[in-house]
Amino acid sequence: MSSLKPSASTMSELKIATRRSRLAISQAEWVASAISETHPGLEVSLVEVSTTGDRDRTSRVTVLTEVGAFVRAVQQAVLEGRADLAVHSCKDLPVEGPPDLIAVYPRREEPWDVLCGQDLDSLPTGARVGTGSPRRAAQMTRLRPDVQIEDVRGNVETRLEKVSSGEFDAVILAEAGLRRLGRKAEIGYRFDLEEMVPAPAQAALAVEAKVGSPAAEMALSIDDLATRRAVEAERALLAYTHAGCRSALGALGSLDGSKIRLTGFVQDERGARYGEAEATLPDTVARRLQSVLGL
């Protein structure tokens, strides 16, 4: 991927495929704006796609994410020529994707998990905290073993409403989603890296296009190298450990000069482990952290 270079494109129109949720549309609009800034005069439109994950209101979100239920239909719109680009929340993207598609990674938002509803210390004993993520549940239980962790489905707005209605005392969400929806005021507490390691690729967007297409060349204009190196390391750890969203696995990469520092968390039948590794290449640092975590 890194050998590809953007080149001038004669495209005057660009169609971007996206899920229909408010967050997904907001993310696609951000991508459209970023590309338009580098290609003045470009006409950009959105192609809204209904995915299996959006239609299935009963299965656990962890299962749906692992099988790509939130991305496959959006990818298909590009493969079939109904759209030029597909925009996804990168953490929804399975590590094995269609070989005809290439991904670029724009600048990442804030990657942290946050508590909405109350501050961590103000949660009463026995408080009901909603999350659909085993990773978040495991780390929240370590921080506050006295609270009740309960599964929750729905988009950001639905989850926040469950707090407003009193169904939950708090919910754990990604800060990036709240920022993209203009709802960062809802944040009651931001977990730091020592408290809660984010999901691999959390807060990053993946923009996919057909390999070698004019749209792929155009998308490369918003590819962010620092985000790419960190996300590739995090996703490599996912691939090497075969840990999907049903696993309590977290990973966050950061750059220190030419090196990538990868911090990880896992909880399984052998208990919870945290670890760090450093290397210059994404694959190498992922392998080292895999060893440190004993996976």
Image: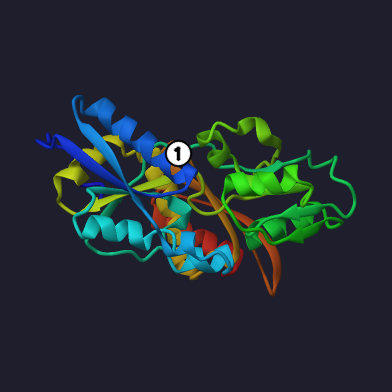
* Residue farthest toward the left in the current orientation of the protein: 10
Of 197 and 48, which appears nearest the observer? 48
Quarter of the image for the C terminus: give it: bottom right
Find residue 43 and report its horizontal and vertical position in percent: 21, 32
Which residue is at 44% across, 59% downward? 70
> Is the residue marked by circle 1 packed among few (<14), some (14-19), or many (20+) residues within 10 Å?
some
Residue 28 in the figure: left or right of residue 179 = left
Tell me which residue sits at (41%, 45%) in the image.
Answer: 205
Q: Seen from this angle, which residue lies furthest bottom?
A: 269
Circle 1: element type: loop
Give coordinates of residue 124: x percent, y percent: 89, 47
Above or below residue 52? Residue 282 is: above
Q: Identify the coloring.
A: rainbow
Report which residue position mark 1 lands on: 108
User: How many numbered tags mark residues here?
Assistant: 1
Query: Height in image: 99 above or below 88?
Result: below
On the image, which quarter does residue 283 sit in? bottom left
Give the residue type that dot 1 points to. Answer: Arg
Picture residue at 22% right of the left edge, 53% below the top: 82
Return the x and y of residue 40 as percentages of the image width and height.
20, 24
| Nearer to the camera, 61 or 100 | 61
Query: Does the rendering let one see residue 195?
Result: no
Q: Is residue 215 above or below residue 283?
A: above
Q: Is residue 139 visible?
A: yes
Residue sitting at x 62%, y 50%: 197
Q: Is residue 54 left or right of residue 150?
A: left
Task: Answer with left or right where residue 122 lies relative to residue 136.
Answer: right
Q: Position of residue 245 (x, y in %)?
A: 54, 64
